[in-house]
Image (spheres, rainbow, N blue to C red):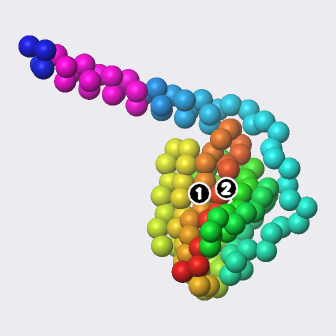
């Protein structure tokens, strides 16, 4: 009898957990944006002349092994941010989008070109701002 009660109870708890996560994601999309991180004094030089999306504000750049990791944000929601990066990569000479995915609050655009590959990770953190993390690795 214990086994028959355990499965429905676990399924119910799992369902509640997923609903709770979805609610927090929704709240983040509706909240006002705090003051953003300060912009870099000048745009970074990215490997392979990687294209930036129109309106992107860069806040940092670092090396992680052979990869270059760039951080920043777009002052827009996830949909337009995804479209801006997918369009910039598709329109850049020598680059192509290898995979792209968009959910309610996050998106990824994978790319290859100019001897590099990597991913643009987008995360909408508040009502009108999407965090951008670009990882560029030698191919």
Q: Is residue 131 left or right of residue 6?
A: right
In what quadrant of the picture does the N terminus appear?
Answer: top left
Do residues under tags 1 and 2 come within 8 Å of each other at their CB atoms? yes
User: Quadrant of residue 59 in the image?
Assistant: bottom right
Which numbered circle lies on residue 112? Answer: none
Viewer-proximal residue among 108 and 59: 59
As for residue 16 lying within the magenta part, the answer is yes
Q: Identify the residue at horizontal 69%, vertical 66% (top origin).
A: 63
Q: Is residue 41 left or right of residue 26?
A: right
Q: Identify the residue at horizontal 48%, vertical 58% (top origin).
A: 101
Local crowd at mark 2 within 10 Å, few (<14), some, or many (≥20)?
many
Viewer-proximal residue among 109 and 135: 135
The magenta segment: 5-18
User: Quadrant of residue 90 in the image?
Assistant: bottom right
Please say whether residue 87 is visible from this viewpoint: no
| Cα–Cα gap, marks 1 and 2 | 6 Å
**Secondary structure category for the residue under label 1:** strand
Residue 57 drawn at (x, y percent): 79, 57
As for residue 102 lying within the magenta part, the answer is no
User: Quadrant of residue 93 in the image?
Assistant: bottom right
Local crowd at mark 1 within 10 Å, few (<14), some, or many (≥20)?
many
Which numbered circle lies on residue 132? Answer: 2
Residue 51 drawn at (x, y percent): 70, 74
- Residue on which disc 1 sits: 121
> Residue placed farthest to the front in the image?
65
Residue 113 drawn at (x, y percent): 58, 82
């Amino acid at each position: 009898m214990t086994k028959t009660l355990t499965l429905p109870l676990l399924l119910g708890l799992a369902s509640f957990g997923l609903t709770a996560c979805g609610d927090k994601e929704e709240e983040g999309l509706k909240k006002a944006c705090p003051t953003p991180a300060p912009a870099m004094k000048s745009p970074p030089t990215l490997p392979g002349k990687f294209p930036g999306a129109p309106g992107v504000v860069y806040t940092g750049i670092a090396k992680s092994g052979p990869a270059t990791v760039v951080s920043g944000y777009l002052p827009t929601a996830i949909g337009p941010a995804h479209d801006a990066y997918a369009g910039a990569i598709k329109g850049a000479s020598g680059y192509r989008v290898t995979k792209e995915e968009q959910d309610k609050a996050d998106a990824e655009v994978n790319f290859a070109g100019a001897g590099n590959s990597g991913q643009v990770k987008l995360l909408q953190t508040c009502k009108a701002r999407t965090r951008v993390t670009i990882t560029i690795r030698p191919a």
